[in-house]
Image (cartoon, rainbow, N blue to C red):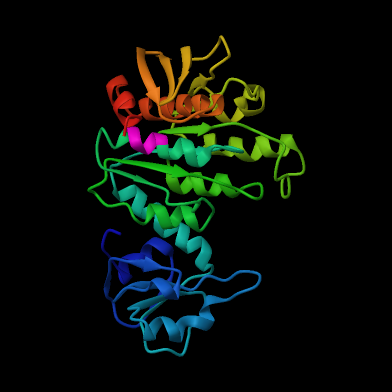
Amino acid sequence: MISVTLSQLTDILNGELQGADITLDAVTTDTRKLTPGCLFVALKGERFDAHDFADQAKAGGAGALLVSRPLDIDLPQLIVKDTRLAFGELAAWVRQQVPARVVALTGSSGKTSVKEMTAAILSQCGNTLYTAGNLNNDIGVPMTLLRLTPEYDYAVIELGANHQGEIAWTVSLTRPEAALVNNLAAAHLEGFGSLAGVAKAKGEIFSGLPENGIAIMNADNNDWLNWQSVIGSRKVWRFSPNAANSDFTATNIHVTSHGTEFTLQTPTGSVDVLLPLPGCHNIANALAAAALSMSVGATLDAIKAGWQI
């Protein structure tokens, strides 16, 4: 994380500082991942309260605490109304300080594959940060953003949700140049109620785009009308191995012992590629990754090279 003082954080998070003003360059919410002098964020959930582990955080080397109530511990403490929201606001501030080009993605399935394919492409173009594992919720997304430093040229951020409003929050922290919904499916409906509820939740990702941002969607999921009010006048790219109205598609598809060969068709030209993964669903994922990468300037050569690693 980029360095910041507690007094700066007090202003950023509209909190109250008790104790000495120190400089921080690391943040954690987990007492198992403490580093010397880091800020320990005491999150509180329905079944836990990390304020109870503040003594453990101090013993493990934490230099300061982010809390929602004063604690009887001899450590500098930044007191805020809600540590969960403050954690996100801190991540948003870090994101604003770093000039990396950021893209975000969500979907019912294939998110991890698209994320990793996109990161492989953008790594051909510059130093690239991407979401580790499935850290895609309202805690995981800030964790990823806090890893940003000026050394990164690109960031690929995966957004997930188990309820309405979660992606609207995390995309507001992420502020991507382009956002993608990989697909929609009537799976894991808890918290959404129906496929229409899933579509609404996933479509929140487009609310975080700037006016010159690019909304990217699967042409095989006909949800443009559901999202049009969110997307507004922003540019839209569609991808599909099948649909005729796609901006990104695949032709001359051949399955080989090494993977799948096809011609990638894009708005800026075409290139023959070898995708070292089987299955038509991975062609769709690859098209999504190509679109997301090209939205921040990746070339056809970078796409081809990224998939050959």
User: Residue 227 colored magenta?
Assistant: no
Q: Position of residue 249 (x, y in %)?
A: 48, 16
Q: Position of residue 86 (x, y in %)?
A: 47, 63
Q: Position of residue 201 (x, y in %)?
A: 64, 40
Q: Is residue 208 visible?
A: no
Q: Give above or below for 227 relative to 135.
A: above
| Total marks in image | 0
**Foreground residue, 302 or 18?**
302
Instruction: Tell me which corner region of the image, top left, top right, bottom left or bottom right, holds residue 122.
Output: top left
- Screen quadrant of the C terminus: top left
**Foreground residue, 210 or 193?**
193
Q: Residue at x 50, y 32 (%)?
A: 180
User: Residue 120 colored magenta?
Assistant: yes
Q: Residue furthest left?
A: 151
Residue stretch in magenta: 117-121
Instruction: Tell me which corner region of the image, top left, top right, bottom left or bottom right, holds residue 184.
Output: top right
Q: Residue at x 56, y 9 (%)?
A: 244
Instruction: Tell me the chief SS of the magenta region.
Output: helix
